[in-house]
Amino acid sequence: MYYENDVQADVLKGKKIAILGYGSQGHAHALNLKESGLDVLVGLREDSNSRSKALESGLTVKSVDDCVKEADVVMVLLPDEKQKEVYDSQIEKNLKPGQSLVFAHGFNIHYKQIVPPEFVDVFMVAPKGPGHLVRRTYEKGSGVPALIAVHQDYSSNAKDKALAYAKALGSLRVGAIETSFKEETETDLFGEQAVLCGGVTELIKAGFDTLVEAGYQSEIAYFECLHEMKLIVDLLYEGGFEKMRYSISDTAEYGDYRVGRRIVNQEVRNEMKKVLSEIQDATFANQWIEENRTGRPFYNQVKADELKHPIVNTGKSLRTMMKLEGDK
Ligand SMILES: NC(=O)C1=CN([C@@H]2O[C@H](COP(=O)(O)OP(=O)(O)OC[C@H]3O[C@@H](n4cnc5c(N)ncnc54)[C@H](OP(=O)(O)O)[C@@H]3O)[C@@H](O)[C@H]2O)C=CC1
Ligand SMILES: CC[C@](O)(C(C)=O)C(=O)O
Ligand SMILES: [Mg+2]
Ligand SMILES: [Mg+2]
């Protein structure tokens, strides 16, 4: 683990850092780095919806081409599926020896969609959390942990740069781990598909549907299966399984031990292994590349269907009456 005190060299001081993209990660990196005293530029397309937001926050916005021409460090925070196209058309031709090309996720390097020239450093600072939390935790004096990895070390100090970047982002307040692009890419894809996003939403929906189909009120099903998920996960975050199990009733803890493994059973565990092997052998990556090439038919269909699930409207009307942490 690396923490703030492990970073001695101020290798990014006085360097120009271009953040390409101002979405979930982009806005957080640009603002955190700027507030940490670094010289930040934001790279956006001409007609970008994010331009006014970045300008309002006092950031300098330029075209992607100009950012790459001017910066010492170029952090690519564009959607994974757009990175190759932007790299091919606007980044590659502007790269100069000694620059750093940085990613927050290894997809395009690991699956060889982007193959940078040998004369640049290529490294990663990958926060293990959503961009809006990278920003929110930084503002509160904390941060989101990160993974750092060096793919190409032209300057012989790519790792120092990755650590200095992670420090400015706020991640070294909570810790960073060194990894490889392969390990970050495969674990990140597995985590979001099987556990954090795909796993959790299907678990919530299955619980909600079971209660509603049995005749219980949908609002109670929503509180039980979705709203309270955060409150339970907060305890996991603060103190692991032990703190969560300390706070819940013994009845709940007994039910947890009795029933949990009937739900996430051997069949589910076998399917997780299959999902992981499809990430490792690039089946998933190729599907996602093809999905984008053909206009996202599967993604668009499921996205539309998900919005029709009864949990959506139940949650919408309940949330209008709630004062929730995180609401602006
Ligand atoms: N979301 C997250 O929390 C996490 C993301 N990551 C990684 O971070 C990277 C960025 O993801 P994320 O923040 O979700 O991305 P978003 O989709 O939130 O942000 C996209 C940004 O890219 C800009 N953009 C899109 N297409 C182009 C283009 N052709 N040219 C110029 N700008 C463009 C958009 O600008 P416009 O306003 O013009 O649309 C927008 O500002 C990915 O590699 C992802 O895997 C890693 C950890 C967590
Ligand atoms: C869990 C999803 C994630 O990997 C993330 C926020 O860390 C992503 O790609 O957005
Ligand atoms: Mg992730
Ligand atoms: Mg991810």
Image (cartoon, grey):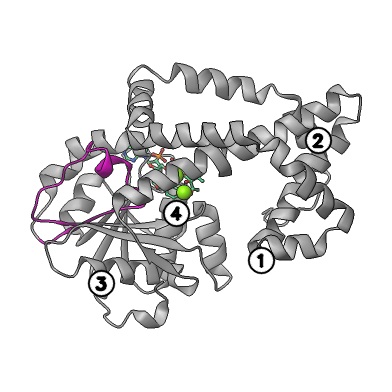
Name the spot of residue 202 as percent of width and height, x first.
Answer: 65, 32
Q: Is residue 175 above or below residue 245?
A: below
Identify which residue is drawn at 50% across, 63% down. Answer: 144
Do tag 2 and tag 4 residues touch (Cβ < 8 Å)? no
Q: Is mark 4 within 8 Å of ligand 1?
A: yes
Is 103 a magenta residue? yes
The answer for how far apart the CA atoms under marks 1 and 3 are is: 30 Å
Residue 325 appears left or right of 214? left
Q: Which mark is residue 27?
A: 4
Q: Residues within 10 Å of mark 3 (few under 14, many from 20)?
A: some
Residue placed most toward the observer, 163 or 38: 163
The answer for how far apart the CA atoms under marks 1 and 4 are is: 26 Å
Name the spot of residue 177 as percent of width and height, x first.
Answer: 39, 65
Which marked residue is nearer to the observer: mark 1 or mark 2? 1
Magenta span dominant secondary structure: loop
Name the spot of residue 47 as percent of width and height, x first.
Answer: 36, 36
User: Which residue is tagged 2?
Assistant: 317
Question: Quarter-wise, where is residue 82 in the image?
Answer: top left
The answer for how far apart the CA atoms under marks 3 and 2 are is: 49 Å
Q: Is mark 2 within 8 Å of ligand 2?
A: no
Q: Which stretch did the figure color magenta?
A: 98-121
Which marked residue is nearer to the observer: mark 3 or mark 2? 3
The answer for how far apart the CA atoms under marks 3 and 4 are is: 23 Å
Q: Quadrant of the C terminus?
A: bottom right
**Which numbered disc flags the more N-terminal residue, 1 or 4?**
4
User: Which residue is tagged 1?
Assistant: 238
User: Which residue is tagged 3?
Assistant: 160
**SS for dot 1:** helix
Identify which residue is drawn at 21% across, 66% down. Answer: 158
